[in-house]
Every structure is written in structure tokens, then in C-alpha cells.
């Protein structure tokens, strides 16, 4: 990574960038981004559960930098490609030891 930070290389350091945090997941590969961010009403994954690409959104950032048009249904092959890449990456990681806590969640009868 250091040659990239020092400006000695300008090619992408990775073929894809992967991310997960609780049920939130993302993969960026070229101009494409697969992302899933459950809304406020979504319940958190039970301890021992895991994230998945089910219900994720697909965007072509070259054409839609603001992520306004979900292409998941119109580009099923690209969705499957990125989902498979993310699932493979995720399977190679250890399960998370902790999960995010939603702000405003009740603890001990009081809201945080």
C-alpha cells in the first residue's frame, strides 16, 4: 500500500474493496458498488448471525454517483458477480465478535 500512498504507483491497490459492519455491507469493484444498509426499523443481527448480500442495492457509480438508481433487478448478472465476490471475501473472515448497537436503544429500562 505504501507505494500507492507515496505516489509511486497509480494503479488500483485492490481489484475490489469489501466492507461489513453488522448487517451493513458493501463491495466496490470498478464503477460498480453493491451496498446494503438496513433502515432504522431493521432489527440487528442476533449474536452469532451474519451479514448477507440479500436485499442489497447495486449502483453504477460512473453513471450514478449519487446512488439514486438501484440496478439490482436490471443488472442481475452484475449483482450476482459482486454478491459472489463479497460472499467469498466474507467467508474468509472470522465472524464478528461484537455487533453495532443502535442509538436510542433501551438499556436497563432507559433510552440511551
Image (spheres, rainbow, N blue to C red):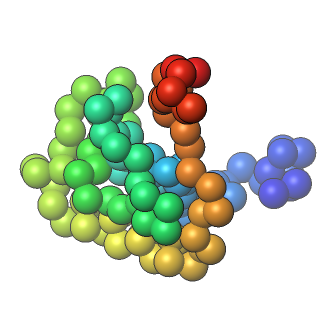
State the residue in front, 66 or 94.
94
Q: Measured along the vertical axis of the image, is residue 7 above or below residue 108?
A: below
Q: Is residue 100 left or right of residue 97?
A: left
Quarter of the image containing the N terminus? bottom right
State the residue in front, 71 or 46.
46
Q: Measured along the vertical axis of the image, is residue 100 above or below residue 18?
A: above
Give me the residue at 35% from left, 24% from top. 66
Q: Is residue 103 left or right of residue 97?
A: left
Quarter occupied by residue 49 = bottom left
In the picture as drawn, the residue positioned furthest to the front comes out as 109
Is residue 58 visible in this depiction of the protein? no
Quarter of the image containing the C terminus? top right
Give me the residue at 55% from left, 32% from top. 107
Give me the residue at 41% from left, 47% from top. 44
Is residue 7 visible in this depiction of the protein? yes
Q: Is residue 95 left or right of residue 82?
A: right
Give me the residue at 34% from left, 43% from top. 43
State the residue in front, 10 or 36.
36
The x, y position of residue 19, in whole percent, is: 54, 53
The x, y position of residue 79, in whole percent, is: 25, 59
Q: Measured along the vertical axis of the image, is residue 81 above or below residue 43?
A: below
Quarter occupied by residue 42 = top left
In the picture as drawn, the residue positioned furthest to the left comes out as 74
Quarter occupied by residue 108 = top right
The x, y position of residue 92, in whole percent, is: 57, 79
Amino acid at each position: 500500500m505504501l507505494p500507492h500512498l507515496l505516489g509511486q504507483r497509480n494503479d488500483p491497490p485492490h481489484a475490489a474493496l469489501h466492507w461489513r459492519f453488522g448487517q451493513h455491507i458493501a463491495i466496490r469493484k470498478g464503477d460498480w458498488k453493491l451496498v446494503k444498509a438496513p433502515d432504522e426499523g431493521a432489527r440487528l443481527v442476533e449474536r452469532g448471525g451474519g451479514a448477507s448480500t440479500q436485499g442489497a442495492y447495486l449502483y453504477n457509480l460512473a453513471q450514478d454517483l449519487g446512488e439514486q438508481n438501484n440496478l439490482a433487478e436490471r443488472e442481475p448478472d452484475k449483482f450476482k458477480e459482486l454478491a459472489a465476490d463479497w460472499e467469498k471475501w466474507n467467508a474468509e473472515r472470522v465472524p464478528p465478535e461484537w455487533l453495532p448497537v443502535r442509538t436510542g436503544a433501551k438499556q436497563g429500562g432507559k433510552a440511551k
